[in-house]
Image (tube, rainbow, N blue to C red):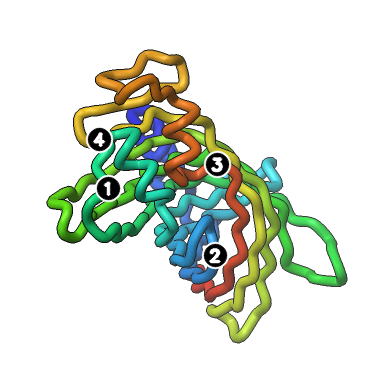
Amino acid sequence: MKFYFQLLTTVLILLIITPSHAADYSGGFLIGYSGGTGFHLNGTISHFAPTLPLKMQLGVAYARMNPGKADDARKIFINDATNGEPEKSGKNWDFRLDFLYQIQVLGMSDAYLYGGPRYSKFTGNFKYIGGNEDFNITCNQWGWGIGTISYFPMNKTLDFVLTGGFDYYLSGILVGHDTQYSPDGENVNPRRDFDYGDADKAVNQPKYELRLMMGINWKFK
């Protein structure tokens, strides 16, 4: 997480020092599917380096998602109780930095291939009505992604946007109640003889995520 904020600071410095006459700025809002249904906000700068044929885009996305198997999660993180009616919900925030390279595809004049690092913050909530249990399982992960994005002008300042891509996230530590399971086997207060593989199967933290989104983009210059 510290590295991400350092990266964000670097990007902001680049935005500040870039001459206003050289750079073009835009901001976008997308909705669709990204590991779950949600939205994506982003800001883009182009011509930030005159000799570099890339745009730079910083974004944050939010998605609602299925957090996993409620019965298995209780056994692996709390106890073997079976009482109560399970309710569950999941959400994920991800932060992303992409570099966009213009391509020619299907005759579209404003299409780009993009790729860059990702950082996600997943939370799954499991509640057992009548069982007096309500707990979160969290997982923070690094990853990277690639995709394509196309802009279709609606007027001088507004574009319609379509994007599709794929994100991959590395395994992260799963923390719930007073228990945590780590990919390196350094678990804290594990239940019975459960290990990270069992926790990983029970909880749907981001792994291989398809992205299909659409929205609008505003040009500031």
Whichever of callouts 2 and 4 sits on the residue coming sooner in the sequence is 2
Closer to viewer: mark 1 or mark 3: 1
Measured as percent of width and height from the top left, residue 25 is found at 50, 61
Measured as percent of width and height from the top left, residue 153 is found at 65, 80
Residue placed furthest toward the left: 132
Question: Which element type, helix, strand or loop, lies under badge 2?
Answer: strand
Closer to viewer: mark 3 or mark 4: 4
Measured as percent of width and height from the top left, residue 72 is found at 39, 42
For the residues marked 3 and 2, what is the alpha-carbon distance in whole angstroms?
15 Å
Q: Classify mark 2: residues with Cα within 10 Å, few (<14), some (14-19) or many (20+).
A: many
Residue 207 got which mark? 3
Residue 143 got which mark? none
Q: Is residue 210 above or below residue 212?
A: above
Q: Amino acid at mark 2?
A: Tyr
Which residue occupies 37% across, 25% down? 181
Closer to viewer: mark 2 or mark 4: 4
Whichever of callouts 3 and 4 sits on the residue coming sooner in the sequence is 4
Q: Which residue is mark 1?
A: 82
For the residues marked 1 and 2, what is the alpha-carbon distance in whole angstroms?
33 Å
Which residue occupies 21% across, 35% down? 177
For the residues marked 2 and 4, what is the alpha-carbon distance in whole angstroms?
34 Å
Q: Which residue is mark 2?
A: 33
Residue placed furthest toward the bottom: 155
Which residue occupies 65% across, 55% down? 165
Q: Which residue is mark 4?
A: 79
Whichever of callouts 1 and 2 sits on the residue coming sooner in the sequence is 2
Q: Amino acid at mark 3?
A: Lys
Q: Tell me if 148 is positioned left or right of 21 in this view.
A: right
Q: Amino acid at mark 4?
A: Asn
Measured as percent of width and height from the top left, residue 157 is found at 54, 79
Whichever of callouts 1 and 3 sits on the residue coming sooner in the sequence is 1
For the residues marked 1 and 3, what is the alpha-carbon distance in whole angstroms?
29 Å
